[in-house]
Amino acid sequence: MKKLTILASWLAFICLTTAQAQSDSRAPEFDITKADMEAHLRFLASDALQGRRTGEMGNDIAAAYIASQYATFGLKQVDGAQGYYQPVPFEAITPPSAAKIVIEDETYTQGDNLLMMTGNLEPTKTKAVFANYGWVDEETGINDYDKLDVEGKLVFVLPGTPEGQDPLTVFNSMSKKRKLAKEKGAVGLIELYRLQFPWQFFLSYFGKESLNLADKMETTKSNPNFVYGWIKEKNKETFNAMKDSKKTKVELSSEGFSRRAVTSNNVIGLLEGTDPELKDEYLLITAHFDHVGTGKNGGSPYTPEDSIFNGARDNAMGTTALLGALQALAEAPPKRSVIFLAVTGEEIGLLGSQYYAENPLIPMEQVIFNLNTDGAGYNDPSYVSIVGFGRTGTDGLVEAASNIFGLDVFPNPAPEQNLFDRSDNVSFAKLGVPAMCFSPGLTSFDEEISTYYHQAADNPDSIDFDYLQKFCQALARTARLIADDEDRPFWVEGDKYEEVGKQLYER
């Protein structure tokens, strides 16, 4: 009987939200036109913007275009922003042009089996120390440096952390591991390359200029000659022996490393809600507007005839949907206030959203939901794909908003890809904010997706603009239903972000 009651309640909820969607068919999102959405996307993904790479002019032009739309539709500027901009400080890092490590009788050279990523160091002789993962975490009691003397020595570590060795954890832990080794007085830190994807891909990706958040980089004033890199082991026995030895000798050198300051911008605006009480609660709509640029920066094959990675699907499509939602909600504001946040730096590690999450202009405990829109592309235009479906109690609203425009919901596509933690929504979920990623109709990573994902072929002429219109309408409608709903979304029981959500909202 209890199961029947729960089923009846769920069906009633679906019927209610569907009726709500259908009864409000004159809301402005129903008037979003294909022509308007096509115009946004064609500009954002045009060759003139040169792939919108963070820190380059095309990215700045895209930010200015988004800000102009905010102004057109009367969004308020947020205290702490510079107009509609939140400047994000980066450092552009150029790896050393030459580096060498000699361990006993094995030699490793830059660009071959060594990738030194930071630091200039004159030829130095010292000892090697193995420090497990090189990780310290007070909450879990992990301290890989306990009883280790690394002063003046070169530290070798395993990739990732004791709690995770997946690629995202590996990359996100790099900065903290450098900082820890530096604080312990080491001359450098070298991670052992034991990842699942090819070394040449890693070498190509990290062997060129990269951007990091400036406030996350270790200061050059303290131990400026500290070196950091990765090694492709010739012989694992050498490093296994290092674990039990305090006498392993190494020689190392590094030169040609440089860094420079770069500024990019998040673009933020505020639409005030209509309800006297609920307007102090905020729906946060996000989309990243950066892409990977041109030529070798794109990381994929290109030709002299087409070397621009336009990023029409990823993520001019999502940015266009954000602007469509802006147009609809500004014409008829919902009960809750809405923050529109177009973020930079997603393609280099979710850095724009990370920066905002760490430096919010509106308190995070007042943000009731993050509706992020991003995607690798689409292979079925009959769907919207919801990454995070079933996790925040918003499923009925999303389905009602999508169905009314003739779209079905495909829940949590390609689970093996861990997509939820690979887009900007995770920057807010980590703080406890209920979140989802509203994506174009991806059902699996098939040939259709790989044809365009991070490829030069992903240009405006390849887009189904009838589908784009429906996608934008469905996003805008989803935003309205969530912003107007009497109940606040929250993580379902047992979700990995439930506990931090309770802390954020003091539940």
Image (tube, rainbow, N blue to C red):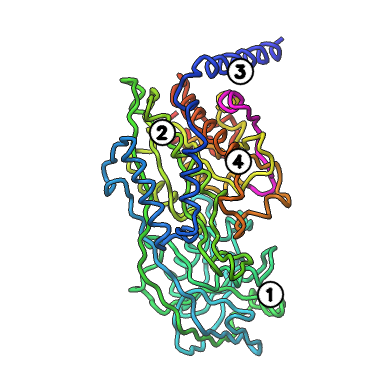
Label total for image: 4
First-in-chain label (2 vs 3): 3
Q: Nearer the viewer, residue 493 or 343?
A: 343
4 and 2 marks in contact (CB < 8 Å)? no
Residue 258: horizontal and vertical position, in percent?
A: 41, 77
| On-image quarter of the N terminus | top right
Distance, label 3 to label 4, CA atoms, is: 23 Å
Residue 135: horizontal and vertical position, in percent?
A: 53, 62
Q: Reply yes or no: does residue 471 show up in magenta.
A: no
Q: Amino acid at mark 2?
A: Gln
List the residue tagged with mark 1. Answer: 240
Of tags 4 and 1, the one toward the viewer is 4
- Report helix, strand or loop for mark 2: helix
Magenta stretch in the rendered image: 400-418
The residue under the point 43% across, 31% down is: 368
- Report helix, strand or loop for mark 3: helix
First-in-chain label (4 vs 2): 2
Distance, label 3 to label 1, CA atoms, is: 58 Å
List the residue tagged with mark 2. Answer: 327
Distance, label 4 to label 2, CA atoms, is: 20 Å
Q: Is residue 85 left or right of residue 471?
A: left
The residue under the point 65% across, 34% down is: 383
Q: Amino acid at mark 1?
A: Asn
| On-image quarter of the C terminus | top left
List the residue tagged with mark 3. Answer: 14
